[in-house]
Image: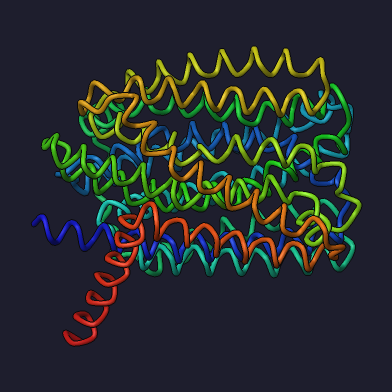
Amino acid sequence: MAESLREKTAGGFLWNSLDYMGVALVNFLTTVILSRLLAPEIFGQIAMLEIFILVSMIFIESGFTTALIRKQDRTADDETTVFLCNLGAALILGGAFYLCAPLIGEFYGRRGLTSVTRLLAVTLPVNALGIVQISRLRAEMQFRKLTAVNVASAIVSAITATICALTGQGIYALVWQQISLAATRSLLLWLTGRGFRFTVFSRSSFLSLFGYSWKLMASWLIYTVYTNLYAVVIGKLFTPSAAGLFWRSRSLAYYPATAFTSVVQGVSFPAMSKIQETDTRLRSAYATMLRMSAWGLFPVMIWLSVFARPVTVFLFSEKWLPCVPYIRIVALALALYPIHAINLNLLCVKGRSDLFLRLEIIKTLIGIALLAGGSYFGVTGICWGLLLNSLIALTLNTRYTSPLIQLSLRRQIGYLVPALLMGSAAAGSVLAALTPFSLSATAETIFSLLLTGAVYYGQSLLFTPGNVRELRDMRTKMKRKREAAAAGA
């Protein structure tokens, strides 16, 4: 059993890596194309509306996804109950969203957003159709199927958005991108997943699942509102163009951060759930995930911060240069993103959704205070507040998880320090080496990335060889698994 779980976890990491790297790559390339075709103001307007869609999805999902994955004895009644709750909530909220669209347009002083808002409401019931299927695939660690679905959906939505942008549809290119993504993903989930056996709505299943999940729902609601409040505040206090520039800086940093976090989170929660009763194994798995997350992401985010200017010009053109100062700060803040996710996953695995909720309330209050204070210094001040809040959140998260597995705050921080030092040294040395040369944005981006990666890998072989071995072991186990599957076929 232990070996089987390790193999599934290793395979899960690699398939999740392919999944989210594939999706991130497709979305990234699409964003590059759309950023050259559309103005910052258009992206800002969509960012200003995202909070309403995302908050609605939190209510629709209601934390049931996590509850289903965590429950070891899932039944058809559980899945049917969750499906009916998801779909019913989506239809109600979608209708309310449609009716309230004119009020949202008036709030921002832009009546043209009414029709955009109403179209976006369509994504709510469409997304709800696939929530249970995603839960089942993750719970059963069927990451290969999930990879195929997510990558195919991203490609379809990318093609749709690009065609719409090229034909002059402006903001609607981004709207149809989201609608096509939701529709394709839900359709493929039903076509590729094993048969869904409908039974009846079970009151006992609902109470059992919701008793665990409502605190997670409240936590995610608080976090989602806070995270997307930045675009609302900037769009309201400043301009949609400023909101678009901030969105660009955060979304660029989000690509590596969320892709890496999704890989870690998608595998870590079901894997840790299976060993939740064994503290020794859980502590070991948790420490490994912390160490590998920092080792894999820190150098990327530090490189992005140091070389933000050439990267921006290379990818998006010079019209996006005003967002460079924001990228430098936000990239450092989001470097801790997967660390936060692993900490919170541990709380979920241990059934401490009460601590999860308490943490989100505390961190959100601190974040709102920093957002309000930072707004007096413009968008740059808001970015510095985001970085400070990320550091505070790391301290709070690790302090709450320490007693659960007897892993001190100092030891948890210690897992992160080597990657931070090596990443900083690698990017700093490459910057010093390239500064005397007058390189184009394209050349500086490519050379700095390759050289930083090479220097960092060399440092890893010298100072943290265990991380390199861990990665090689995961690849070897995945290869053996594929060979065994091929032999069985």
Image location (x, y in percent) of residue 222: 52, 23
Dividing the picture into quadrants, the one containing residue 434 is bottom right
Image location (x, y in percent) of residue 266: 37, 50
Residues 227 and 111: in front is 227
Q: Measured along the vertical axis of the image, is residue 407 above or below residue 257?
A: above
Q: Measured along the vertical axis of the image, is residue 233 above or below residue 466?
A: above
Residues 338 and 60: in front is 338
Q: Is residue 149 left or right of residue 50?
A: left
Image location (x, y in percent) of residue 367: 60, 19
Residue 115 appears in the rendering: no
Residues 462 and 338: in front is 462
Q: Is residue 393 left or right of residue 305?
A: left
Residue 478 appears in the rendering: yes
Please name the residue shown 33% across and 46% down the image.
289
Dividing the picture into quadrants, the one containing residue 409 is top left
Q: Is residue 41 left or right of residue 185?
A: right
Please name the residue shown 53% across and 38% down the image.
57
Q: Quadrant of the C terminus?
A: bottom left
Dividing the picture into quadrants, the one containing residue 36 is bottom right
Please name the residue shown 16% across and 84% down the image.
488
Q: Is residue 283 left or right of residue 127?
A: left
Q: Quadrant of the N terminus?
A: bottom left
Image location (x, y in percent) of residue 243: 80, 35
